[in-house]
Image: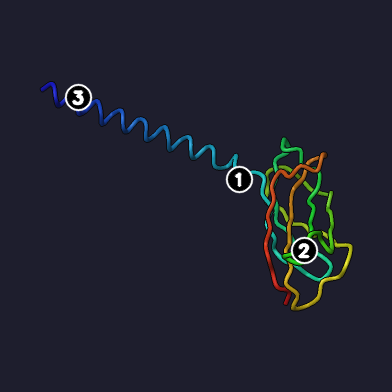
Amino acid sequence: MRTIRNYRRSALLTAALGATATALVATAAPAVAANSIDITGVGPANIGIDYSCEATAGVVAAKALVGAPEADSPSASGSHSALICDGSARSAVIALTGAPLSAGQTVQVRVALVDHTDTVVSGRAEVVTLG
């Protein structure tokens, strides 16, 4: 009888720990995904982005850098400061200044949500070939 009780106690403890871990992961995931940015399109003079940010993140702008993948510095850059940070998924277009991009060109595109000190809150980099 004693071994059955110990077995039940272990099973109960394991189930309780598993439920607690699942609850922690389920509640932490939305907080981690709250500030994000994705590249949706790259044109010769602009970049399309999808973003979301929380009001408490301090995001003031989305910035972009574009250039040859092996270059030391970008050939074009841009910024979009009319962002709405309320946790909802949104879209925006960042206009680029600098050397225009051309069809067939392979470029590295870096986009980021930044705070007032230009610290990256969330960022993404992709190498794309313009169509």
Q: Mark 2 packing: few (<14 Cα in 10 Å), some, or many (20+)?
A: few
User: What is the CA distance from the residue labelled 2 to the residue labelled 1?
Assistant: 31 Å
Q: Secondary structure at mark 1?
A: loop
Please identify the residue farthest to the right as the structure is shown: 98
The residue lying toward the viewer, choosing from 76 and 122, is 76
Q: Mark 1 packing: few (<14 Cα in 10 Å), some, or many (20+)?
A: some
Q: Secondary structure at mark 3?
A: helix
The residue where tag 2 is placed is 71
What amino acid is at disc 1?
Ala
Q: Which label belongs to residue 33?
A: 1
Please identify the residue farthest to the top as the structure is shown: 2
Please identify the residue farthest to the left as the structure is shown: 1
Location of residue 57 by image quarter: top right
Which quadrant, please, contains the C terminus?
bottom right
The residue where tag 3 is placed is 6
* Residue 122 against residue 73 in the figure, above or below: above
* Residue 124 against residue 116 in the figure, above or below: below
The structure residue drawn at horizontal position 73% and vertical position 62%, both measured from the top left corner, is: 109
Please tell me whether mark 2 or mark 3 is closer to you in this view. 2
Which x, y percent locates residue 87?
A: 68, 43
Which x, y percent locates residue 90?
A: 71, 53
The structure residue drawn at horizontal position 19% and vertical position 24%, both measured from the top left corner, is: 6
N-terminal of the pair, mark 1 or mark 3, is 3
What amino acid is at disc 2?
Ala
Which quadrant, please, contains the N terminus?
top left
User: What is the CA distance from the residue labelled 1 to the residue labelled 3?
Assistant: 41 Å
What amino acid is at disc 3?
Asn
The structure residue drawn at horizontal position 24% and vertical position 25%, both measured from the top left corner, is: 9
Location of residue 33 by image quarter: top right
